[in-house]
Image: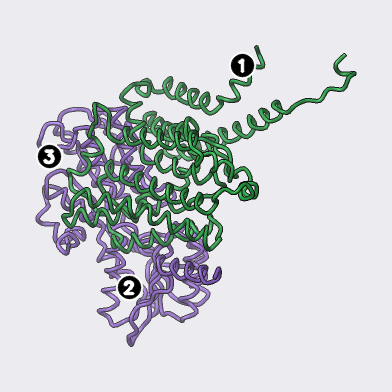
Chain colours: A purple, B green
Amino acid sequence: MKYKFIGILIALTMFATGCGKSGKSKDGLTIGVAFETLQTEYWVAGFDAIRTDLEKRGYTMLQAISNGDPNRQLDQVKNFITRKVDGIILVPKDAKSCLPIIKAANEANIPIVLFNRPADKSDAHSVAVVADNFTLTRETVSYLIDQAKKTGNKLQAAILIGDLGDINAVKRRDGFDAAIQGHEDLIDVVARIPTEWNQEKAQAGVVNALQANPDIGFIFTSSDFLLPSIVSALKSAGKYHKIGEPGHVLLGGFDGDATAWKMLKDGYLDATGVQDVYFEAAQSVQAILDLRAGKTVPDLILDPGFVIHQGNLDEKSKQMWGAQMAAKK
Amino acid sequence: MRRRALYFALRQAPALLFVAVAAILSILSPKFFSLSNALNLVVQSAPIAVVAVGMTFVLLTAGVDLSVGAIMFAGGALAAKLLLAGHSVALALLVMVGCGVFMGVINGFLIVRARLAPFIVTLAMLFVWRGFALWVTETRAMNLPDWFIQFGTARLVGVPVPVVVFASVFFLAHMALTRTPFGRQLYAIGNNVENARKAGLPLNWLLFAVYAISGLCAAIGGILALTQLGSVSPKFGENYEFKAIAAAVLGGTSLFGGRGAVWPGTLLGVLLIQMLESGLVMLNADPYLYPIVTAAVILFAVLLDTSRQAILEQRSRRRIYHDAERT
């Protein structure tokens, strides 16, 4: 009786955590795709884009999600290696924990590409396809600063920082700081809110920041996925107004998801830095093929992305993955 | 006189620590010490406070419930689906509460009937319900209609609704633990399960009840969090289990059962954690300092609690004097 329950529990847990799934079998190459998480729209869009790309080429995709557990991800990749995949696309938990995974792939002579999160420098060899987090954030915040200049007032600002163990979050914070540097007469950063990529922490953080500094007029979030938290906090404080209305808080983000698209369209969001998820997916698959063909591939392939704002909304919306996801809903 | 003062200080150690942290934050940030911020703290604490009440019930029986955050997420995901499909708020909230109780009952069933360890059962259920919720939401954030967050800011006789719910849950839990046979029986189980069994207490029923209560509290906490956030993201409810355990332990609840209280213990624990997070934002502290400061205060509080228990137990022992000592 007891063993029966344990068996059921294990089976349910494996089902719930997506362990051991695999794609349809087709002729051609087999690529293992291991994601650390699917917990934001961006990762879901990236996963779908890679799958679509591989399917178009007639390749088989083996898939695994480790739900934030690097040890589990190592086991999943070893499983790929045992199944003799032709290439691995990996979204690691962080820059360090992926090094044993890359080394395992190197030892098996299987090309490995890191999607959207690079690894630390080491003797392990991989190719990373990542957004230019620093530059894209700096450009987005610079646009917001230009808008701030138009108000003619010195603005109090807040930044929502992601998980400080995530190199992407750190680069975005650095990009924010670089944009603000030299504009201290115009922007006073009064709150740096660590969110750990958690909406509830973000909401509480913004509420607290507004409590301490009711005049905050400029908020940047390191991911659009935290925008609903900001909106909720601003509404509670009676500060959620459209662009051009008195009391509008300048808002900027990063990612380019469907929520950001809707807020841009409705006139509440000033700008967001868009990662080109389709470019990154295509480059990841191409890098695998090039590595297999023995071509030289740079260790880092940068996605320049673009800033979408009220001034170029119509022109850029077709390239924005969030707009396309919103259209599908 | 001095001994009485020492006893008082030891007994009130959690409250004194709370006052000390509040005083330090008020000195460092003048805006911290205000009525509006106090109210803000209580509103923000409401979801975790309600979850921590359920956790206190479980901890008193020497159990643990690691699935509370996942229950919040699963119930929230179903409620959000219903709301976005145009169903009424009443139905959505009813489903969420029903889910909480149902999931709590499953935990209770596996622990009581299958005799599995609470840690293993609730850990497995954490993955099951989180996986279920990810499947329901298709791993996408679900933004609720704009009017939904009005519940989070609504007031009842001038008091914010989350505070009313928070206070009601604490009052009911306090009364249940201190004024009913049910409450006394929970302490008895936690103190010594074998003695409780020999005394003829309905162990199975009591354990069933505490996990159902924990599931119910997780669902109510989830509703409060939803009304403040207006969105169900894939990380909804994440780490609530640890926050709830930390709050209960900070308030003096023992992880080994039999000791603790929701009033004032768990309440102080919840407010202390929230106060730290809020205070650090108000001070515009370096983001790297947050986990260090929070962990240091929690560790200090638990150390203080352990020491005071040891001292109080030592002092309350009856001393036997030899004749020579008396003279």
Depicted B218 relative to depicted B269: above or below:
below
Q: Which disc number belongs to residue A243?
A: 3
Foreground pick, B95 / A143: B95
Which of the 4 quarters of the picture holds residue A231? top left
Given the image, what chain letter belongs to the residue carrying mark 2? A
Give a yes or no on whether discs 2 and 1 share a subunit: no
Spatial CA distance of label 2 from label 1 is 72 Å
Residue located farthest toward the bottom when viewing the structure as drawn = A27
Upstream in sequence: badge 3 or badge 2: 3
Residue A280 is at least partly visible in this image: yes
Mark 3 or 1: the one toward you: 1
Label 1 secondary element: helix
Residue highlighted by disc 2:
A285
Given the image, what chain letter belongs to the residue carrying mark 1? B
Relative side of B314 to B23, left or right: right
Residue A136 is at least partly visible in this image: no
Foreground pick, A167 / B83: B83
Residue highlighted by disc 1:
B5
Mark 2 or 1: the one toward you: 1
Spatial CA distance of label 3 from label 2 is 40 Å
Image spot of residue B207 (x, y percent): 51, 51
* Rendered-image quadrant of the N terminus of chain A: bottom right
Image spot of residue B90 (x, y percent): 22, 48
* Rendered-image quadrant of the C terminus of chain A: bottom left
